Amino acid sequence: MKHIVANIYADLPKQGPDELFQTLLAKENIKIERIISRGHACRTDEWYDQQQDEWVMLIKGQAKLQYKSNATIILLNPGDYIYIPAHTKHRVHWTAPEMETIWLAIHIFPNENTHD
Amino acid sequence: MKHIVANIYADLPKQGPDELFQTLLAKENIKIERIISRGHACRTDEWYDQQQDEWVMLIKGQAKLQYKSNATIILLNPGDYIYIPAHTKHRVHWTAPEMETIWLAIHIFPNENTHD
């Protein structure tokens, strides 16, 4: 059996105008994802409203996350992690424009469902 | 609702002779864990044989992981991640002695079970 090591900082694809989402593992009801941003942000009226819980860590770069409930804006630096329960409306307010921001997101779907 | 940010590099507890395991999130059938090593290794005859799948990333430091099946030893540097299916016997062969090694481990238990 081959044991494959990959690196979260490596093989950053050429980036167009959109954020990049790459599934690192999809298993049972969870999905582990690498997200690469470079100056990307959601529109001011664009809110994520997810059916699944998300645990997300900022690996590299810098970002600001906004919550709809109280308009709080949270600055995230490398190593910062946060738990976003399902249906907690949030958006990416800002990401550093001059470098890649790398996120690690763990999506936890309800047990009765499977991920996409 | 309060949105709590924590940092994977922060609040490293004083370390005794053992590795430290801290649960960052336990939800549905998954457990997200921070593991801190400092020169720790398993005994040469000590193998993890887990009922759950594990996805693990080395955040900081350096480590060597060994698999029983083929005696392969894998060097892990920051950002390296690897998927360890359930019942893949493995051990920590070495961790850097002069600094903390921080791991992020995602344990994925079979859907019918819950984590400890």
Image (spheres, coloured by chain):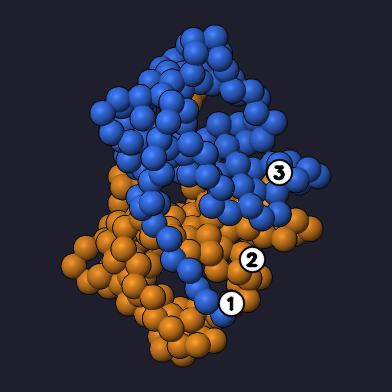
Chain colours: A blue, B orange
In-image side of B69 versus A101 (left or right): right
Q: Residue at x 58, y 77 (%)?
A: B88
Instruction: Return the residue at label 2.
Output: B52
Say above or below: B65 vs B81. below
Say above or below: B110 vs B68. above
Tag 1 or tag 2, which sits nearer the N-term?
Answer: 2
The 10 Å Cα crowd at callout 2, few under 14, some 14 to 19, many 20 or more, is: many
Instruction: Return the residue at label 1.
Output: B88
Q: CA distance from mark 2 to mark 1?
A: 10 Å
What residue type is disc 3 on? His
Marks 2 and 3: which is nearer the front?
3
Q: Output the chain of dot 3.
A: A
Q: Can residue A70 be seen in this snapshot?
A: no
Q: Do the numbered discs 2 and 3 sit on residues whose CB atoms are within 8 Å?
A: no
Q: Residue at x 48, y 36 (%)?
A: A20
Q: Which mark is residue A115?
A: 3
Secondary structure of residue under mark 2: loop
What residue type is disc 2 on? Gln
In-image side of A60 versus B91 (left or right): left
The percent coordinates of residue A82 (x first, y second) are 47, 35
Looking at the rendered structure, whether the residues under marks 2 and 3 are on a common chain is answered as: no
Secondary structure of residue under mark 3: loop
Q: Residue at x 36, y 43 (%)?
A: A59
The one nearer the camera, A11 or A2, is A11
